[in-house]
Amino acid sequence: MSIIDLTSMGEPQSDLRKELNDRLTKLQDEISDYCFQCAKCTSGCESHKLLELEPHKIVALLKRGLLNELVNSDVIWTCMTCLKCRERCPQRVAPVEILFALKNMAVASGKQIPGKYTGMLQSILSMGLIQDIQQTTTRTNKTLKRDELGLPPLSKPIDVVKFQAGIMKIAMEKV
């Protein structure tokens, strides 16, 4: 008989928790069991300020083994990867690594990736950048390019085919 979380009526998924902890152990020395819910990770989280992502609650759900809610949720995709949670955690838990692992688990289980992420990946694969190089507008409504602002040109991959193969190799390794 397993314990049921009365807030979500979910049962712990010990097999998923073990898989996630195995992935995290490869990435870092300490795992989620060291988190004592001080919420320092959430206090510095840029996504929390804008999108209500609470990294300490994600770690708490992981500790309880309630992963189906996380893997099936869109909240794991709202992380801005600012890495402040890793810097602020006194226990070195790094919720950002947990979110990476949850995203990889979601993709591996066939969950749909939000459209903007696939668009960014396609853009990176096609031109080496997340988006086209933008022009900026000054206060006087004059449109300027990077070189007109004295900024260096952005470099793009020289060998696009080799770059694409490298990105795909990295993507497959992370899953």
Image (cartoon, helix red, strand yellow):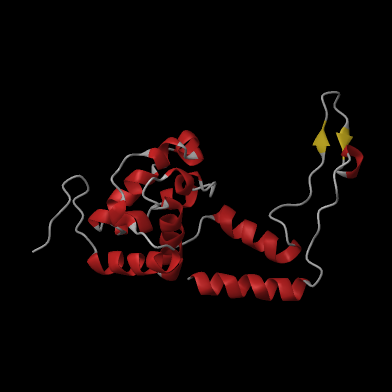
The image quadrant that residue 158 belongs to is bottom right
Q: Residue 44: horizontal and vertical position, in percent?
A: 47, 37
Number of numbered tags placed on the structure image: 0
Whether residue 74 is visible to the viewer of this picture, yes or no, is no
From this view, report whether residue 132 is shown above or below residue 157: above
The image quadrant that residue 147 belongs to is top right
From this view, report whether residue 15 is shown above or below residue 2: below
For this rendering, which residue is in front, 4 or 174? 174
Q: Which residue is at a point 54% across and 74% down the rendered structure image? A: 172
Q: Which residue is at a point 67% across and 76% down the rendered structure image? A: 165
Q: Residue furthest top?
A: 140
Q: Is residue 129 left or right of residue 28?
A: right
Whether residue 54 is visible to the viewer of this picture, yes or no, is yes
Q: Which residue is at a point 79% across and 45% down the rendered structure image? A: 134
Q: Residue furthest right?
A: 148
Q: Which residue is at a point 30% across and 59% down the rendered structure image? A: 68
Q: Is residue 158 left or right of residue 35?
A: right
For this rendering, which residue is in front, 95 or 136? 95
Q: Which quadrant does the N terminus fall into?
A: bottom left
Q: Residue 113: horizontal and vertical position, in percent?
A: 50, 59
Q: Is residue 66 left or right of residue 119?
A: left
Q: Residue 173: horizontal and vertical position, in percent?
A: 52, 74
Q: Residue furthest left?
A: 1
From this view, report whether residue 52 is shown above or below residue 133: above
Q: Residue 60: horizontal and vertical position, in percent?
A: 29, 49
